[in-house]
Amino acid sequence: MGIASMLQIDEMLGDFNRMNKRQSLYQVLSFAMIVSSALMIWKGLMVVTGSESPIVVVLSGSMEPAFHRGDLLFLTNYKEEPVRVGEIVVFKVEGRDIPIVHRVIKLHEKEDGTVKFLTKGDNNNVDDRGLYAPNQLWLTKKDIVGRARGFLPYVGIITIFMNEYPKVKWAILSILAIFVLLHRE
């Protein structure tokens, strides 16, 4: 660390020491309000979109040229809307934590009204049966997290970068927390 960095840290600690108990409590409550506001916005989006994860980041190039790695997708998952061939869906497979973004290529509708479908990445040579849970050949509506309704190109690359380099993520979050706690306005 350089002398300038040490002086900045010393200055921030001095600011914190000069705060009285009321100011310190106010800063902690402000930080808690920021975190709780973000959580409320997320939960509100979940209710409005009907999706457990209304915003996802594309993590691979399997959907190129439609979506690229790092694109931010906006999802909806209204239960009354039927799944259609050609639609881009985000689904979770049993035993995998990370959802997959792929296109519906086949639909299988039974007489009793149940619908099963098969997916494939636009940039992949084969369908997704190899990605599904063992002995699972088709997806059902319960596997769907949401359907892509819009996207922002490359905005999610920050998320990918922070997940690939966790030390950077924790450094950024720590700096933001310190800034919120020590900032007096």
Image (cartoon, rainbow, N blue to C red):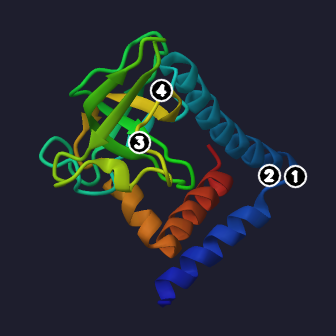
Neighbourhood count class around disc 2 (C-alpha, 10 Å): few under 14, some 14–19, many 20 upward: some
- Residue type marked 1: Lys
Task: Mark 1 vs mark 4: give the one in front.
Answer: 4
Mark closer to the chain start, 3 or 4? 3
Mark closer to the chain start, 1 or 4? 1
Mark 3 lies on residue: 56
- Residue type marked 2: Ser
**Which residue is at 40% across, 38% downward?**
138
Residue 28 position within the rendered picture, expressed as x and y whole percent measured from the top left: 76, 48
Q: Which residue is the extreme one toward the front? A: 111
- Residue type marked 3: Val
Image height of 63 relative to 140, above or below = below
Mark closer to the chain start, 2 or 3? 2
- Residue type marked 4: Lys
Number of the label disc, if any, that sits on residue 55: none
Number of the label disc, if any, that sits on residue 24: 2
**Which residue is at 52% across, 20% downward?**
50
Q: CA distance from mark 3 to mark 4?
A: 18 Å
Q: Is residue 132 left or right of residue 58?
A: right
Do the residues under discs 3 and 4 have CB atoms within 8 angstroms? no
**Which residue is at 56% across, 61% downward?**
173
Mark 1, secondary structure of its residue: helix
Q: CA distance from mark 1 to mark 4?
A: 53 Å
Where on the picture, by quarter, is residue 148?
Answer: top left
Residue 127 position within the rendered picture, expressed as x and y whole percent measured from the top left: 26, 48
Residue 125 position within the rendered picture, expressed as x and y whole percent measured from the top left: 16, 55
Mark closer to the chain start, 1 or 3? 1
